[in-house]
Image (cartoon, rainbow, N blue to C red):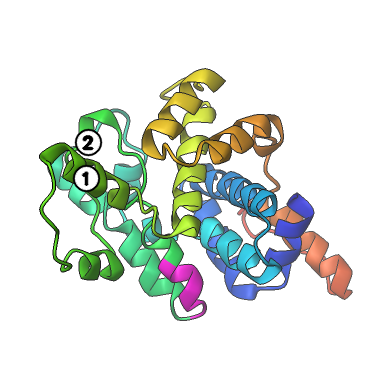
Amino acid sequence: MDAVLRALVRSDPVLLVLLRGLELYDGGETYGHSWRVARGVLHVARQVGWPTSEQMTLTRAALLHDVGKLFVYRKIVTKPGGFTEEEFAEIRQHPRFGFEMVRMVDEAAGRILVAHHDCGWHPPQQSRRKYPRSDERRRNERRTIPRRPRQERRDRDRRQDLGIHDPQRLTLALADIFDALASQRWYKRAWADTAIRAELIERAPVLTEVADWLIAARAVLQESVPTMHEIARASSAMMGDAPFHPVNGC
């Protein structure tokens, strides 16, 4: 799986630069998360059987889904504990920032990543503070809502919020949630498989297979992530260029 990701990154100078920026941003935390999420979406895409071109677009979107955080103050992203309202208002802009960057080189990947929090999970203490919705979601909201019993309408609205109309966006959202829960961070422990499965099914009850696929591949998806130095050195060696040497320890 990593061989595909490495080849994709080596073939795209824009990916190389942006991922290196993420690696430098917060000591590799966001970069590592992005790489593991890309593993997850690629694994699901293979299970589903999407065409190779769609797999690569989705994988590129996963690698760059948090690139908009480069425009958010690092002290906010790395802050221990919860966010204030002002801080959350800042950090929730990162999907839009990422879209504006990525759309210049890959419109399709940009449209996937901009909505990865539209259909995703929010920490319990932040569940009422929503991320900005994508342009497509805004258009959908203009449709006339037929008269239905209140609970049925709520269920319908919840399914729309899950992004179920776009399986690739939902795949990215679930892989993002999965890694956030499965990874041990300095501020939390990794969740058990049963707890992760329950959370994913709660968010996307009609896609239990995706939750099962991610959990079954947990050991592989959580393996150590190659550094950008390693990828760049391999790329230089393949092309016969001079060896890559980091500057000032960077």
Residue at position x 69%, y 53% from top? 46
Residue that numbered label 1 is attached to = 88
The image shows residue 91 at horizontal and vertical percentages of 28, 50
Q: In terms of image quadrants, where is residue 76?
A: top left
Residue at position x 45%, y 34% from top? 200
The image shows residue 16 at horizontal and vertical percentages of 62, 66
Task: From the viewer's side, name the closer residue of 226 and 46.
Answer: 46
Quick check: can you spot residue 192? Answer: no
Residue at position x 49%, y 21% from top? 191
Marks 2 and 1: CB-CB under 8 Å?
yes
How far is mark 2 from mark 1, CA to CA? 8 Å
In the image, what residue type sits under mark 2?
Answer: Gln
Which span is picked out in magenta?
Answer: 105-111
Residue 107 falls within the magenta-colored stretch? yes
Task: From the viewer's side, name the closer residue of 23 and 95.
Answer: 95
The correct choice, above or below, for 47 with respect to 135 in the image is above
Q: Nearer the viewer, mark 2 or mark 1?
A: 2
Task: From the viewer's side, name the closer residue of 43 and 38.
Answer: 43
Q: Earlier in the sequence, mark 2 or mark 1?
A: 1
Task: From the viewer's side, name the closer residue of 157 and 131.
Answer: 157
Residue 126 is marked as: 2
Number of other residues with Cα within 10 Å of mark 1, as a class: few under 14, some 14 to 19, many 20 or more: some
Question: Residue 133 vs residue 192: left or right?
Answer: left
